[in-house]
Amino acid sequence: MSTNKKPRKRYKPKPVYTNAFERAIEAATPIGQAHASYYNDILLKNHSAMHALTHGQATKGDMDLLIAMANIMEAFRLLEICTPLSDEIAAGRRALIDISVRAAKVHRIVPTGPEILALNVLMELHDELMPHITGAQLDRGIALAKRVIRRGEATLLPGSQQMIEAAAA
């Protein structure tokens, strides 16, 4: 009996939109207009995470929010939505990596002054860019970030397991 040499792939249905016209309009509308409450929730969560970080009360959840914000900004840079700002985005990512390395060593999530400055600039860029991003651009950015993570090309934060334990203590 011959066996199939290619393993079967799991069936993954494509999304079905009940109103394709509404979806097309939503994709072309900036997030700040189409989903104001969603945008305000993102702002509130990111700023509260930044506040906790600057006051030495950050948890793993706060760091996850800041890392997600940096990831989406990096995806927008790769999609050439905010190419002139690549130095600021790289500085913010570097600051998050440095904070994670330090958290793994000292078991506390505490940033330095230059790291806070770099993250503040990254947060300001995020706040300025997000209301002007369309739904389609956001979908492409999220898909790109997921693809990079799935391929294993993402930068793994050093000491992520120790950071989890430090935040729990």
Image (cartoon, helix red, strand yellow):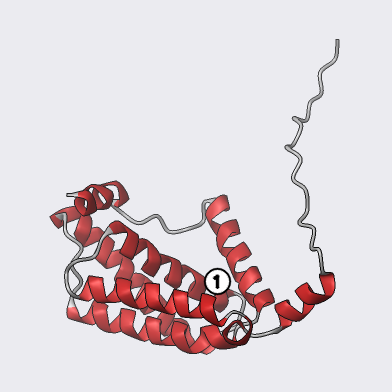
Residue shown at 21% from the left, 58% from the top: 103
> Number of labelled discs?
1
Q: Is residue 109 visible?
A: yes
Q: Mark 1 points at which residue?
A: 75
Place of residue 113 in the rendered image (x, y in percent of width and height, measured from the top left): 18, 80
Above/below status of 13 relative to 111: above
Q: Nearer the viewer, residue 141 or 30?
A: 30
Residue at 60%, 83% (x, y): give it. Answer: 133
Considering every residue shown, the one lying at the far left of the view is 106
Picture coordinates of residue 77 (x, y %)? 54, 78
Quadrant including the N terminus: top right
Residue in the image at 47% along x and 80% along y: 40
User: Label 1's element?
Assistant: helix
The image quarter in which residue 32 lies: bottom right
Residue 108 location (% of width, % of height) = 16, 59
In this view, the residue in front, 6 or 70, is 70
Q: Which residue is drawn at 73% across and 37% down?
A: 10
Question: Residue 149, relative to residue 52: is it above or below?
Answer: above
For the question of whether residue 83 can be seen, the reply is no
Of the residues shown, which amino acid type is indicated by label 1? Ala
Of residues 136 and 35, the one nearer the viewer is: 35
Seen in the image, is 77 located left or right of residue 43?
right
Looking at the image, residue 20 sits to the left or right of residue 67; the answer is right
Q: How crowded is mark 1: few (under 14 residues within 10 Å), some or many (20 or more)?
A: many
Q: Where is residue 80 in the image (x, y as percent from the top left)?
A: 61, 81
Pick out the residue farthest to the top: 1
* Residue 157 image-quadrant placement: bottom left
